[in-house]
Amino acid sequence: MHQSKMERVRERVREKRESYTQYNFERLQEEAFASFFDLAQEYTTLENLYLVCTLVPKEFFNLDARLYLLDEDGITLSLVCSSNNGLEEDSSAGNPEVTVQENPYFTGESYVIPIRGNKAVGELLPFQYLKDILGMFEIYPSERITEQQRFFLEKFTNRIGYNLHQKQLIHQNLHHIKFINQLVADIDHNVISPNLYYRLFLRKLKRQIKEDVAIQEKVRELVSFCPEIDDRTCQKLREIYHTLGDNITALDESRKEMERHYERTSLYLETLLRREHFRHGTYVLRKQRCNFRTEIIEPTLARYLPQFKQREIKVDNRLEEVSDELLEVVVDKGLLAQVYDNFFSNAVKYTEQIEDDYGYKVKFLSYGKKLLKDYFSQGIDGVKFTVFTTGKPVDPDESDRVFDEGYRSAGSELEVGTGHGLHFVKHVIEIHGGEVGVEPQKYGNTFYFILPQRHDKVDVTNDEEPVRRIIW
């Protein structure tokens, strides 16, 4: 693979060498090319690049030039620079005969060439929209331009387009980075910090419920002193007592549900919107020890149990092969919780009913884990975490592609999705030093990830690599 890529690039180098031989540029034209490339790299601003574009033809060939760029409407040309005036303040002061056209053409006094950017670069960036033509380059007087010079000027304009496009991308990227940094500050101020209010609210609600329980107890004491069991006042007190108890129970259940939702939402927000992610341009791990079952799997599963019940999907964890007491993997808890969130979300969508060997129709999900001795290397075991769902087994040809960005397997069109979830899973596990995969089974599919487990304890601090401390 590496060699074939090298050969392709080598072939392009040879083609370019042959092309320049065929171009047969004059010495002065070659020097103009070299000067343009040097200065385009030396100057970092778009304004200086505009000046270089128009002054190279002037200084080398005594030809004047005007540089026009296409407005966002894709129709209007604005004059930005000329060899006579430099940076133009009046964008409409150019030659009215210059219009946007696909091919070079002559006006009464000028030769006009379309400026095109590097489409291959533009397609790499999801936010970059590249018009076919960035602008037009006007050179005059046309009577002094020979046919050989026309060819050179067309090639020169191509180089203007590529350099202009790169400078535009750099400025656009800087603008995006500045926006992202501001967005992160806004998120921290307007999302993360206010989210703490809900924690305070839940604490107050819990205290209020305790006070209501104390009031209920006082009502019970009053009822216990009633002289007659049939006394109407005592009957009312008993009714109040039971109604108050029912309300307290319902309110406390709602509080617990809100608390669970708050904890998961806060965990996801604080994990995905972590300032360090944006600063470094990748996920920055905050590793900590945690009990996978009680802190990651079960809280995440609890969110999906109502949906599993609605779709008649049974949940089973009898595939466990290693107890939590024997397991200690240091991970970013927030990111790993979202790994299981993606697995369970897919399970809701794609688990199907099958008929087993005994003729029973079953539809279920199971999860588990097992230890893989020395899986990564001597002394570094692997812990394999699995989620199995019944349904049609993944085609072997698809098993290597299901974790690719944007990929959706055949038959998934009926469910809403983007094909991003499993790619996110792969990315998170790989930055933990692990690996992911899917194993088609007779009655369904096992999605899994494997994380390394060292035979030592790990001291963990936020935003830093673990510091190893050998204890056995």
Image (tube, grey):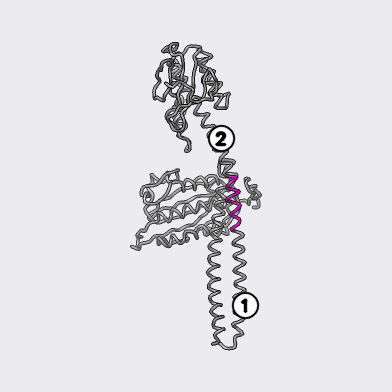
Residue found at x 35% / y 62%: 361
User: Toward the viewer: 371 or 441?
Assistant: 441
Inspect this view and state whether residue 221 appears: yes
Q: Position of residue 462 (x, y in %)?
A: 63, 48
Does the stretch in magenta take in 194? yes
Q: Residues within 10 Å of mark 2 (few under 14, many from 20)?
A: few
Residues at circles 2 and 1 in contact by the CB criterion of under 8 Å = no
Q: Position of residue 451 (x, y in %)?
A: 53, 49
The prevailing secondary structure element of the residues shown in magenta is helix
Q: Which residue is mark 1?
A: 218
Q: Position of residue 191 (x, y in %)?
A: 57, 51
Quadrant where the N terminus lies? top left
User: Toward the viewer: 88 or 410?
Assistant: 88
Mark positioned earlier in the residue sequence (2 or 1): 2
User: Toward the viewer: 233 or 291?
Assistant: 233
In the image, residue 34 sits, relative to residue 295, either above or below, namely: above
Q: Which element is circle 2 on?
A: helix
Amino acid type assigned to the residue bearing label 1 in the image: Lys
Q: Position of residue 300 (x, y in %)?
A: 51, 57
CA gap between label 2 and label 1 equals: 66 Å
- Magenta span: 184-198
Amino acid type assigned to the residue bearing label 2 in the image: Leu
User: Toward the viewer: 196 or 466?
Assistant: 196
Q: Which residue is mark 2?
A: 174
Q: Which element is circle 1 on?
A: helix
Does the stretch in magenta take in 283? no
Q: Residues within 10 Å of mark 1 (few under 14, many from 20)?
A: few
In the image, residue 87 sits, relative to residue 282, either above or below, namely: above
* Outermost left residue: 359
